Image (cartoon, rainbow, N blue to C red):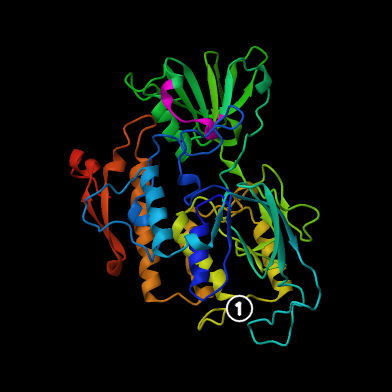
Amino acid sequence: NNDDDDDEGTKQKKKVQFEVTVLETRNSVGGIWKYDDDDNHEGKKSRPMYRNLRTNLPKELMAFREFPWGAGDCAEPSYVTHKQVYKYLEDYANTFDLLENIRFGCRVDHLKVVRDKGEHKHETKEGSDELDCDSWPQISLKWTDNTDNQSHQQTFDNICICNGHYDLPSNPPLRGLKNFPGRVIHAIEYDTPTEFAGKTVLCVGARASGADIAREIGSVAKRVYLSDSSCNAMEEFGTANVVVSMPRTQSVDKYGGIHFFSSGNNGSNDEEWTLNDVDVIIFCSGYDYAFPFIDGESNLELENVLGERRIRPVYEQLWHAQYPSLSFIGLPHSVVPFPLFEIQSTAVVSQLISRVGSVGLPSLSERLVAAESDASSGGPVTPGRVQDTHFLGSYQWDYCRNVAKKAGVYNDDMENYIATNKALYDCSGKERKGVTPGGDDVYRETRFRRMEKEQSYEILHSEIMLANPTVKT
């Protein structure tokens, strides 16, 4: 485990007196939020956290439900640094006495489903006579303790995979890239803007990390081009702003020129641009899922094709459809992570105990049909694409409601919590999307207070509203 999902899964299990073991690759809690000055692997930075990162979601939205963040008194910013997030996760782990369950410095090497048919039976919670004889098998893990390089093996009744999806960089194919004479890196290698001073940089990908990295580099670079697949034309934003929006990056020609392409309606307004002055290409193109400890000897079907960003078969983006004693916390992307992890973890535990109000998983055949339908859907947006299978975005709230109902924890208080999160998410997103590429990110100066009974929030301070009192957020 090397992400921040582990703390919540551990706490949910401790509540009902499970014997819990957490295997964590790193030597501390916090996952990707633990920034290391000495992060260097074979001459490259190997973790996505960079020095000046500040969250693009307010802490009032990011917090676990059971562990509020701040007193709501405007004493500290709503948009916090990675150090503050790490401190919050440390406090969380200490408050709920989770450290005693965590084995740090342990690398999981192999996972194997124990297929003793008939030995590990799990009666369906719907009260039917059906027994999924080996649908809930035990699972064996092998791991290495990096402190002494000793190997270990243990069999568990339930496994939660919480290793996140910010470890394996995804580099989209770019025709002719070998012809580019400059430097090519992925955003995972980015740390500070200083090394790009006076250079011309192309950032391929304009979502959160791409836009933030372009803005940072723009403070010292000669020029920064931000390639956005949703952009229809080259666009500049004034002489004082060195960041330029570009359409989709199409190819690199034999002379090293980079081509960009935009198609209008029915292809009638096709346009192309070429840049010949780029020194560095940074792929801000996200990450692929990676489960290096699952292979052909793991006794389970798990499809994970590089570039597709789709895991199958999974039921409700959480349980392995055939073997729900194996679950995946945090598969959905473009979400508010900690609250979603919390609800998912509660749902996993609800299937292991007799919680009043929880809804048992359907039969094996129904789970497999539902999992295949999800895997083939292309995500919640029509028309879909395979890479958006686990995308949620604005659809995450109904997902949280659905999972909370399965867990037996959906009530008026939970609805107030989810609805307040949605209100904060919508406000934050609206302010963030109003920022010009390369422009000042003044939205990060807004400070919020939650108002759960009203399913709303109060803005305690806003630079946007001070600059333009007519703006409503």
Q: Residue at x 60, y 47 (%)?
A: 147
Decide which of 330, 466 is in the foreground and name it.
Answer: 330
Residue that lies at the very extreme toward the top in this rendered image:
255
- Whether 220 is drawn above or below 384: the answer is above
| Count of numbered circles on the image | 1
Q: Amino acid at mark 1?
A: Gly
Report the residue at 73% width, 71% height from top. 137
Q: Which residue is mark 1?
A: 360
Give coordinates of residue 393: x percent, y percent: 48, 53
Range of residues picked out in magenta: 186-194
Residue 7 lies, in percent from the top left, at 49, 59
Residue 430 position, x and y percent, is 35, 47
Query: Label 1 crowding class (10 Å Cα cut-off): few <14, some 14-19, many 20+?
Result: some
Residue 247 shown left or right of residue 173 in the figure: left
SS category of the residue bearing label 1: loop
Q: Is residue 95 left or right of residue 322?
A: left
Front-lying residue, 236 or 158: 158
In terms of depth relative to the viewer, which is nearer, 362 or 233? 362
Vertical position of residue 13 compared to residue 273: above or below: below
352 vs 208, nearest the viewer: 352
Taking the magenta stretch, the answer to whether it contains residue 275 is no
Residue 192 lies in magenta, yes or no?
A: yes
* In the rendered image, the vertical position of residue 245 relative to residue 134, given as above or below: above
Q: Is residue 403 visible?
A: no
Q: Is residue 337 visible?
A: yes
Q: Residue at x 65, y 28 (%)?
A: 174
Q: Residue furthest front?
A: 148
Q: Position of residue 346 (x, y in %)?
A: 51, 70
